Image (cartoon, rainbow, N blue to C red):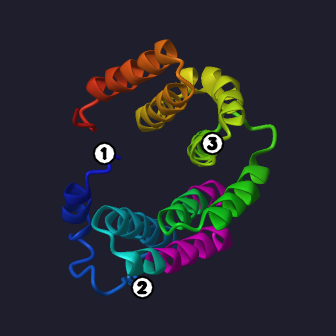
Amino acid sequence: LCRDIYTMQKILRVVWSDESVSPNFDEFLLPIRAELLRLCGFYLTFAGRTRNLKDYHLRAKDLLTNAIEIFERENLPDKAAEAKVNLSFCYWNAGEVGECEAVLDQTESEFKGNTFHPVYLQIKVNRITVLCWREKFAEALEIIESISQAIDLCNDHRLRILFHDEAAIVFHRVKNYKNAIYHFNEGIRFAKETKTFNC
C-alpha cells in the first residue's frame, strides 16, 4: 500500500526469495496464487520504473496476465479488474501509453453503473494521469469533478491520496494554484492519518 519499494521487496521475500527468477506459486490455492502473482507483477513494474530496469516491465506483464486469467477462471471479476489496472500501470511504465489506455477502456466497461466501486475509481485516477500527460486538462478536470463525491465516500486512503495527488498536479498545470494547494494538502492530510504512508 505504501509503495515503498524496499518494504515491498522485504515482504515478498517471504514467498519469493529471488526476484531475478519469475515465481509461479504452484503450491498455493489458485486465488492465493493469482493474488501473489498480481503483487509480484506490481512490484516488478514499480521496481523497474524506480531502477530503470525495462525487462522488469515485460516480466511484470506476464505475471499480471497469468493473475488475470486465474482470477477470471475462478470467477473473481473484481480481483481480475484490479490486476488489469495494475497491467495498465505496467504498460504506462513501459512507455506504451496506447496499450495502457486500451486496458483501462476495457476494464472501465466492466463497471458501468458502479461508479463508487474502488476499482472504477482507481481506473479514473489512472485516466487523470494519462490525460495530464497528454495535456488534455479539460478532460482531466471533468473526471476530477465527476468522481470527487465518490472519493470523499471511499474508505481506501491509498486511493484518496492518489486522487488528491493527481488532482493537485492537474490544477497546478492549469495554474489554478488555489485548488492545487487544496488537493496537495488533502493528500498530505490523508497520508498523515494512516501509518501506511510516510510523509
Q: Relative to 179, say whether 73 is above or below.
A: below
The residue identified by callout 1 is 2
Residue 191: say if magenta.
no
Q: Position of residue 160 (x, y in %)?
A: 47, 31
Instruction: Estimate the spatial distance between the alpha carbons at disc 1 and disc 3, rounded to whole Å.
Output: 28 Å
Where residue 132 sits, quadrant-wise, is top right
Instruction: Please give the name of the residue rendered at 36% of the width and 83% of the height, measured from the top-left corner.
Output: 23
Looking at the rendered structure, the kind of residue marked 3 is Glu
Q: Which quarter of the rendered picture does the C terminus lie within?
A: top left
Q: Identify the secondary structure beneath mark 2.
A: loop
Q: What predominant SS class does the magenta segment belong to?
A: helix
Q: Nearer the viewer, residue 194 or 32?
A: 194
Whether residue 37 appears in this view of the structure is: yes
Say few, some or many: other residues with alpha carbon within 10 Å of mark 2 (under 14 / 14 to 19 / 20 or more).
few
Task: Report the disc number at residue 26.
Answer: 2
Viewer-nearest of discs 2 and 3 = 3
Residue appearing at x 41%, y 67% in the figure: 45
